[in-house]
Structure formats: structure tokens, C-alpha cells
Amino acid sequence: MNLPVRLRLFVGREDALGWLDSAAQDPGVVVVQAVHGLGGIGKSTLVARWAATHRDQHRPIWWITADSPAALDAGLVALTVALQPALAALPSPSLREWAVRWLACHDGWLLILDNVTDPAHIADLVGRLPGGRILVTSRRATGWPDIVTPLRLDVLEPGQAVALLTAIVSQGGGVIDPAGAAALCVELGHLPLAVEQAGAYLAQTRTSVGDYLRLLAQHPAAMYRDGEEGRAAERTIARVWQVTLDALADDPLPGRLLRALAWYAPEAVPRSLWHHLGDGAGEPAVTRAVGRLAAYNMLSIDPATRAVTVHRLVQAVARTPDPDDPHRQPDDITTARTAATIALTTALPDDWRDPTTWPTWRTLVPHVDVLVSQTRAHATDSDRVAQAHLLNATSLFLLDQGNLPHAIAYLKQALADRRRVLGNDHPDTLASVNNLAGAYDSAGDLG
Ligand SMILES: Nc1ncnc2c1ncn2[C@@H]1O[C@H](COP(=O)(O)OP(=O)(O)O)[C@@H](O)[C@H]1O
Ligand SMILES: [Mg+2]
């Protein structure tokens, strides 16, 4: 079982859990999805809770963050390595295939595909698996095949949100009056993620609810009536974020770290990567800043591996410049993206042929994917040059693994960026041309 979600406090959701129980009587795929794409509403938490309470009925329970085809593949590779550690030195495509075959000829397992962005990404896999059980979470409401049973999840009921807030505050040794708690939960739209972060703030700072509401009021309110609800969730989190980062502003490092972490995949940022994000601040200072962010629930740290998870809604806010928010100044966001690129480049192993480095490579490739795709919309010339280097290095690993389509996509991107910024005759551009030709050669596609 590899559930990444911490299940310290859990409130409500009786209906949804009961619904999952009865859906589990029939074989098939169950999709858990949120109403109108709201992030932070509790999809992953619900599924993790259900899996944990049914752990005796399933073996294994395997969690995959499946927000892209590459992430899905990485999760299947990790499943094989967990089931058969001796196979870890095989290249990734073989490990992926081994996992699919294992699942196809066993039953009793539970596979959780978290945060699927497109039903087409999982169609092949689902089609190959007759036994077992698959739970999917997604913000997508439509486009699922007929075999999929959807469940819609809404924000918490007011009483549940208040119970969550009260529990977090009192766990931190604070007290909160019921009327204040109810008013604050209304202000936060009963969004679990926002309630959790506000509760952590109250517990850490011992601020009164009245004062906290005043701090929130200084920032533009989330308007549930205007526009999509997904946007409203983002506005809610942006206000909580600003108040929290104000409290942490005695040290610039926590804000800097959070802005940089926003460019990686949300889950499993290994310590070997995040400890490079201090920009000269030294490892103890970085560790302390990460610990402070965790105390305010802006991220969570896996106690065993020290890997960091940042909710994708918090990441989305942290990547969006806002001239009115001192913690999201456009220049700071550009700087954070550069820092994220440099840290990732530094964290890559030097040698891609040595099988002992492969586990490290495999933990880092998902972050390369997300960094590069999130940067596209904003890339400056220096982003392009720095990321071309990152793509090139990663493609050597992917090529060696026999993962040609992924490697070729990276090499093409690196070549296009180098052409554009450095020109056709620059040695790095020519090296990219060579690498791409070599990759096509091994693909047997000389076109
Ligand atoms: N039923 C619940 N009880 C307590 N906390 C919850 C509940 N649902 C969600 N949360 C908290 O809210 C945050 C967002 O939930 P998450 O499951 O990650 O949302 P989603 O997957 O829909 O984006 C998490 O940190 C989680 O701990
Ligand atoms: Mg989720």
C-alpha cells in the first residue's frame, strides 16, 4: 500500500463512502470526480480514506498519480519495483509492461489513478485489466466510457467544515468559538483545503477568528457567484496563501521555496531535489523553512522519505503573478522558475547508464515533465536555454531506457529552443541536431 495522503483528521463524507462501498460490490471502474472541477475539495482524501478502511480486502493497494501518460507509466514502473525489487535494473518500458501483465492475471488488487486529466490516458490500461478494482479521481466531469460509474463530490457540509476547523485548531492547542468557526468556514466556501490551511494558521499563530477574518478581508474576496467555481477555489486559496506567507515573511526562504516547488509535479519531490532550492542558504535553513511551511499546511512532508507534496491548487496560485500580492511579484515568480530549473539540473545523476542511478532518474523525470510543460506559456530565452540543457540530459537517460517517443519529444523541444535562442550554428544547437539524428537512428525512423 502506498497511499500518499495523510489521514490524520477526516470528517463527514458518509454518503460518498457508502456509495463507494456499494459500487465495490460490482467489478468495474469507479470514477470519483469533483463538481465543476474544484481542486482542494477532497477527492484524493476520500479515495485514500476508503482504501485505508478496506485495506484487508485488497492486495496490493497501489496509488498512481496519473495526471499524464508519463506519470501513469512511472506509477506502473514503481509497482513492478515494489512487487519484484530484483527487476529494478530492467529498463522502464519492460517494468511498465510487467506491471500490466501482473495486474491482468491477478485479482484482488486496488489501483488508484489519482487526478486523471483525460479519460483517453487510461483507456488502454483499463481495457487490459479484467480483474481487480480501479478508482479514478479527476476534475473532468464528462468523457468517461460507459463502464465507468461517476460520483460527484461537493464542498463540505457547513457542520463538517466547522468540525474540521475546530479539530485542527484544538489539535494545535488553540480554542475557537463555534460562531466564529462557522463564519470563517462560510468565508472559505467550505473548501476543505482552505479550511485546513486557515486552521493551521490559527493554531500556529494563536490569532483570533475575528482578526483572521479581518486579514482575509484585506484581500479580494472569492466570489462564488461570478464565473466558474474552479476560479473561486483558486481565489480562496490565494487569500489564505497571502495571509500565511505574511506570517512567514520574517524569513524570505519559505516563500521562495514554495514559489519554486510550484513548478514541479505536486507529489513526491524528493529531498535530494528540494534541498538544492535554498540558493546558497544551506541545508539546515532549507530544512527549517520546509518544516515551517508544513506547520502551516502549505505543503506536507513524507515522514519516511522526506519527500514533499504541495497541493496542485496551491501550486497554481504560486505560479500566477499578481502585482497586488507581495509574495507573487512577477519577478519573483520568474526567479523561482529559474531556481527550480537549476535545482533539477543539479539533482540529475551524472551517469545515465549505471543502473544504480535509475531509481533517482525515475523520481526526477516526472518533475522534468511538469517543469517544462508549465514553463512553455511563459518561457523567456534564458528559460529555454537552461531547460534545453535539462531536456538533453534527461533524454540520454530515456534513450538508454528504450523510451524513444519520450526521448525524441525532449530532443525536439531542446533543438527548437536552441535554434530559436542560440541560432542554427551554435555548438549546442549542432549537438542537439546530432542527438536527435542519433535517436531517430535507433528508432529506425530516418525521416
Ligand atoms: N473529508 C475530509 N476531512 C478532512 N480533511 C479533508 C477532507 N477532505 C479533504 N480534506 C483536506 O483538504 C485538502 C484537499 O483535499 P484533496 O483530497 O487533496 O483534494 P482534491 O484531491 O479534490 O484536490 C487535503 O489536504 C485534505 O487533507
Ligand atoms: Mg487530488
Image: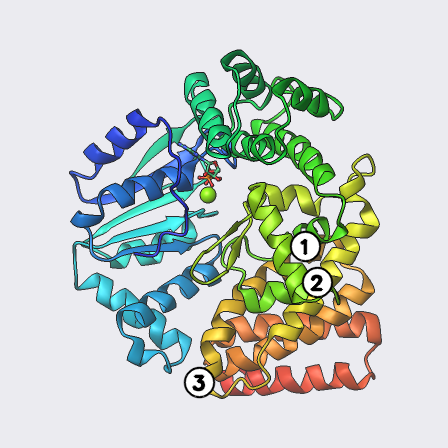
Does the beta carbon at disc 2 come under 8 Å from ligand 1?
no
Label 1 neighbour load within 10 Å: few <14, some 14-19, many 20+ = many
Residue corresponding to mark 2: 278
* Residue that appears at 23% across and 67% down: 102
Residue corresponding to mark 3: 355
Residue corresponding to mark 1: 257
Q: Is residue 119 left or right of residue 262?
A: left
Q: Looking at the picture, which amino acid does disc 1 mark?
A: Leu
Q: Looking at the picture, which amino acid does disc 3 mark?
A: Pro
Label 2 neighbour load within 10 Å: few <14, some 14-19, many 20+ = many
Distance Cα–Cα, label 1 vs label 2: 7 Å
Mark nearer the viewer, 2 or 3: 2
Mark nearer the viewer, 3 or 1: 1
For this rendering, which residue is in front, 149 or 58?
58
Extreme residue toward the front, this view: 173
Residue 124, given in percent of the width and then of the height, sits at 34, 58
Q: Looking at the picture, which amino acid does disc 2 mark?
A: Gly
For this rendering, which residue is in front, 73 or 305?
305
Extreme residue toward the top, this view: 179
Which quadrant holds the N terminus?
bottom left
Residue 422, given in percent of the width and then of the height, sits at 83, 75
Distance Cα–Cα, label 2 vs label 3: 29 Å
Contact, mark 1 vs mark 2 (Cβ under 8 Å): yes
